[in-house]
Amino acid sequence: MKKMDVAVLGATGMIGQRFIQLLEDHPYFKVKGLYASERSEGKRLEDVLKLKDHIFESDTVKMVIDQINTKKIVDECDLAFSGLPSDIAKEYESSLASAGLPVFSNAASHRMRPDVPILIPEVNASHLDIVKTQRTYGDGGYIVTNPNCSATGLAIPMKAIDDAFGLDTVIATTYQAVSGAGYPGVPSLDILGNVIPFIKNEEEKMEEEMLKMLGKFENGAIKSADFNILANCARVPVIDGHLESVTMTLRKDPTIEDLRKCLASFRAEPQRLELPIAPRIPIIVRPEENRPQPLIDLNAGEPEKAKGMAVTVGRLRMKGRFYKMFLLSHNTIRGGAGGSVLNAELAYARRLLK
Amino acid sequence: MKKMDVAVLGATGMIGQRFIQLLEDHPYFKVKGLYASERSEGKRLEDVLKLKDHIFESDTVKMVIDQINTKKIVDECDLAFSGLPSDIAKEYESSLASAGLPVFSNAASHRMRPDVPILIPEVNASHLDIVKTQRTYGDGGYIVTNPNCSATGLAIPMKAIDDAFGLDTVIATTYQAVSGAGYPGVPSLDILGNVIPFIKNEEEKMEEEMLKMLGKFENGAIKSADFNILANCARVPVIDGHLESVTMTLRKDPTIEDLRKCLASFRAEPQRLELPIAPRIPIIVRPEENRPQPLIDLNAGEPEKAKGMAVTVGRLRMKGRFYKMFLLSHNTIRGGAGGSVLNAELAYARRLLK
Amino acid sequence: MKKMDVAVLGATGMIGQRFIQLLEDHPYFKVKGLYASERSEGKRLEDVLKLKDHIFESDTVKMVIDQINTKKIVDECDLAFSGLPSDIAKEYESSLASAGLPVFSNAASHRMRPDVPILIPEVNASHLDIVKTQRTYGDGGYIVTNPNCSATGLAIPMKAIDDAFGLDTVIATTYQAVSGAGYPGVPSLDILGNVIPFIKNEEEKMEEEMLKMLGKFENGAIKSADFNILANCARVPVIDGHLESVTMTLRKDPTIEDLRKCLASFRAEPQRLELPIAPRIPIIVRPEENRPQPLIDLNAGEPEKAKGMAVTVGRLRMKGRFYKMFLLSHNTIRGGAGGSVLNAELAYARRLLK
Amino acid sequence: MKKMDVAVLGATGMIGQRFIQLLEDHPYFKVKGLYASERSEGKRLEDVLKLKDHIFESDTVKMVIDQINTKKIVDECDLAFSGLPSDIAKEYESSLASAGLPVFSNAASHRMRPDVPILIPEVNASHLDIVKTQRTYGDGGYIVTNPNCSATGLAIPMKAIDDAFGLDTVIATTYQAVSGAGYPGVPSLDILGNVIPFIKNEEEKMEEEMLKMLGKFENGAIKSADFNILANCARVPVIDGHLESVTMTLRKDPTIEDLRKCLASFRAEPQRLELPIAPRIPIIVRPEENRPQPLIDLNAGEPEKAKGMAVTVGRLRMKGRFYKMFLLSHNTIRGGAGGSVLNAELAYARRLLK
């Protein structure tokens, strides 16, 4: 079977390069073109490397970066992955969709549009169908987004718990890695030996995206969920991996063992479809008293292709009617490029790519 | 006026040395003897220095450390400050109190005894009187404790808010510095570029100490407060300064401006008595969008002698019936040695030292 | 005595703000105006704070930043301190000197000009006279530079050793703090848990500036010194404080004790003149086996006003004909703003300011 | 072919666990028993995990740790790998060799014995024969050591250069990772945001081990090399990977391109024998201006089994008669367990194991 040709937009950034990493040897997709702003035109990937923990194949690293050119992308590619910064993503992604291309985006620009899904296949696979209401769908073009990195790690276990016990109130406090701010991102002078209790718009995004994702898709529209969600976001001196502390009240009264089982046994659409980068076990529950930790659990997920795609949960506790836990997910894989690749895999399985 | 002679127990540790730092040039107290375990007997303070951000006076640094000797301490000193590890604090502190000495302790060993106060003069100055119910009080001996470092920073603003608006539920999530674990404490291999979402017994201590401190002193006994308190504790790669994210519901419905005023205008007994290391403004409310931060706000507090004794609060927000904020306090000054020195100053002002 | 009015150029940067810090309550100088690029015009100092370890006085922090305006600066000020980035420093500093103003600069732009001194008063006070050969000197204007931050810490002990024992070969390898790159400077993604063995042009600057500074001022010209100097420069995850490992061969054969005495007893012009921010002891020799360290020795220097102005040396060793040691200096105080303030104090004492 | 049964001594430590990691699926060797001190007896490997970047196979992690028992080890195993701390290594390793077992050790205890090789197969494969002079060799027992972690990374490129151009003087200054001190090792309070310019006995070990390793094996004895070697050692806040700055003078006058070729084309016995964990290219020369870096180059080495076994060299420069470069090697793989595994592979190829 011939692989589909894909364009990676924002190829000079952290997320763009995670896309390239995840698409090496992908069974459905093949990177056809790398695109970025005018400034990087003509450079090779090896000249603008951002990832320190991945060695690209020798062919990949020689690829030349093009300036974004809608016509060329549409002519040569079957779909696009976007790791563009939000300020320029809006226009470029709209142009590509208008020109008939499916776009799987990590940018925030279109996330809250009523006709655009914020998709996590384990959480709200049904929402994918809302792309059919996009004005550009008739020509084959549409936009699918993945959520903010800190919302992703939270949404997956919250979905499992909501289905089983009903979320009432969720209070999430984050310990977010610096890679979440892209490159150059956070100056070392601000974060070495420090914590910054503020990330612009992050709490708002976490709160509104959670409600949209966990909402129901009914009568062709997404209806927001209605539990309380409170986010507190801070940056810590960690390279990759967002840790989150979660305190919850639920509509039912599970025991801790009920909660553990619910999380550990959670499987969803990507597992049933055996999508290529779907982790066999999407939520890993650790029994140790001091897990999850960024340095240890960052790349959780099996098989090999799904490394960094599982969410790790630990320290399940209850006190009165409150439940507490910590969770960790890889912010630029599961919470970034990997999220969108999984979205495209779902679209492929649903025959929304052609 | 002659200064009172004090013993510092645990003089080889982080907290013990903060006691020594805070007692240099103290108007009431003068360090008479340094005590630690047998292992350090005969060493000079300069041989076992732990603080990297303070230079001791040349006389101080030459002081010789003694093995703990109850009789000698009682003979030579008027009171004792204890920075002993909890496992040995219990016995030594009891012996000293039994021998007629007031003991101001940072150790957890006696904190939950009904007749021992967990004292923060800004929060529960009235609790000091419970020492009169201690069996050893007749002979002049008693034990006063300061709370766990992470409970201290939380208790002060919570007291201000409780008085004004009534606490209903408090959910605190911490970003705790490594100095909280003492020396050698946290191995660098565990925390460099990492977060550890577990500190043994810390959440339990925060929760139970908060309720005891914010409880009422009635009919000669302390009655625990009854709001909900949930703690989530994690260690971050920061040297000094515990940051905490707090989400609350209250019995009243203040505006954010009400809350800000309540915190910024809070003054209590230590401020009225102008105790030597009491900060003139115990709660500093920062207007910036990204404060408090450990590297910037660690040593908040005026005058000079009160550096590290103020709690800094920022990012006051509300959403529906929930209130959110971040706070920061110096864990080995306000949350450790400084807390006990302030307690002794209150006892001095109340004529409980002689 | 009326204080002289000074302009601080580059007031939004790390070095600019160290100038402001060091000039608070200075006996000769008073900050009259803050200047930066057009982008910061109209902002208050409090809006662009970069230093996390200093709290400015309340008047200072309210000062409004102006766009650099040569005419206004010359009209209102008696001298200027420049913390400008090198790319724009060249032109602005030349303009000010041409307009009759003495300029004390931290920028590299003019350092290697034959008629501009790279001045460290402890090392080459006599070089100051070369300003009299500057074309603009007749009108009262001239430029004096301080060396690169990593050259400063090295030059002071090397001067002491050269005078006593004759330098033959000096091999210096650095562990440089991130503040040396200014703000935003080094991205956290590059340096957290990492070392970067490259700082653009740094080795070249260290090598050529060392030879110029330790050269002789003869017949109205500076003649470079002629020992071998080899620099190897790397960035480490430290906020402030450049550590350097030095291996040397000398023309004479001192014992380690000779070397120690030579360094510890070194005093020079600033000490004889008792210049305000000159450290009483410019080179502090530590006897401990594990010093100097950035976290401990960063702010070495007495009295209070000279904190961060002393160089700390330790681990003096010899093996065969090789001598080895480590040294540390504060890169933005002694190696930056403090260096230029001391230079201006020397000019003041020499009646080169009016 | 049946694999040989091996014992891993010190299985609770960093080096011990790297041995276990490297021996998973090894073609010659199979871990038969894990041994440590009495304190860990009966624990499973999963209870004492130290490595955060490796996930052990599920069988491995369930292995139970035994107290060291010479008789049992000799009865059940064909050879032993030792990651024991030096203070106890001496006696245990001697006992095992006396009882007829080949011991491949990372400990320093026996390194400087005249009849024990400090072996790096790329550097001094011929030295292995000196084991035949060990008193215990007749019974099949002997001891082979790998060098100190910081000497390993230096020795390999120095060997290549010495062979081609003759070493005259080598000055090495290190940036060493905290894992070099084992676990718990360096307290976080000492190293967060800091550099410690001292590692006990490290400089002495580097210097004497380098001369022994690069010495000649003649007439049944190792004769030390006679170039000048000066080491300056410091600890930096990096988890794994020792970076070193090297300044050299040589007996010949190569160009930088000569030097580059000499290093890049270097191959030795392990490459000719295609030993299982030997890297195909033992010295990787990077052309970038800012490499090698710990975060990027730590795991250099191909094929997969040789990850962490290559030394990366970069920034080759010359100035006058001095040559400069930076190098990096994985301190617990190439400079620890991997070094000894490669030594055992060489012994296997030489039929010194039976």
Image (spheres, coloured by chain):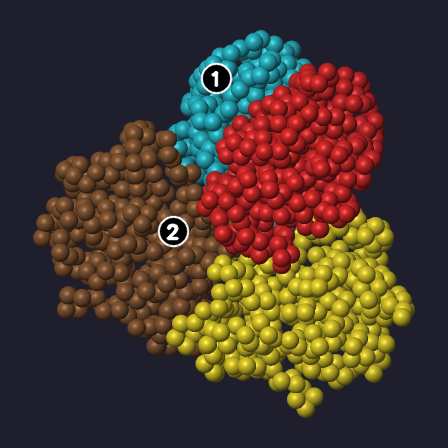
Chain colours: A brown, B yellow, C red, D cyan
**Residue C44 in the image, given as x and y percentages of width and height:** 53, 54
Instruction: Give me the residue at 47% from left, 79% from top.
Output: B254
* Residue highlighted by disc 2: A331
Is any atom of residue D340 visible in this view?
no
Comparing C150 with A17, the one in front is C150
Spot occupied by residue B59 in the image (x, y as percentages of width and height): 85, 52
Quarter where residue C103 is shown: top right
**Amino acid type, label 1:** Arg
> Can residue D288 be seen by looking at this rendering?
yes
Parent chain of label 1:
D
Q: Is residue A57 above or below residue B173?
A: above
Instruction: Name which residue lies at 37% across and 63% down.
Output: A204
Q: In which quarter of the image is residue D74?
A: top right
The type of residue carrying mark 2 is Asn
In the image, residue A329 above or below residue C139? below
Mark 2 → mark 1, Cα distance in angstroms: 39 Å
Q: Which of the chains bears the disc numbered 2? A: A
- For the view shown, which residue lies furthest in the top direction? D252
> x and y percent of residue D281 in the render?
43, 23
Q: CB under 8 Å between callouts 2 and 1? A: no
Q: Mark 1 points at which residue?
A: D260
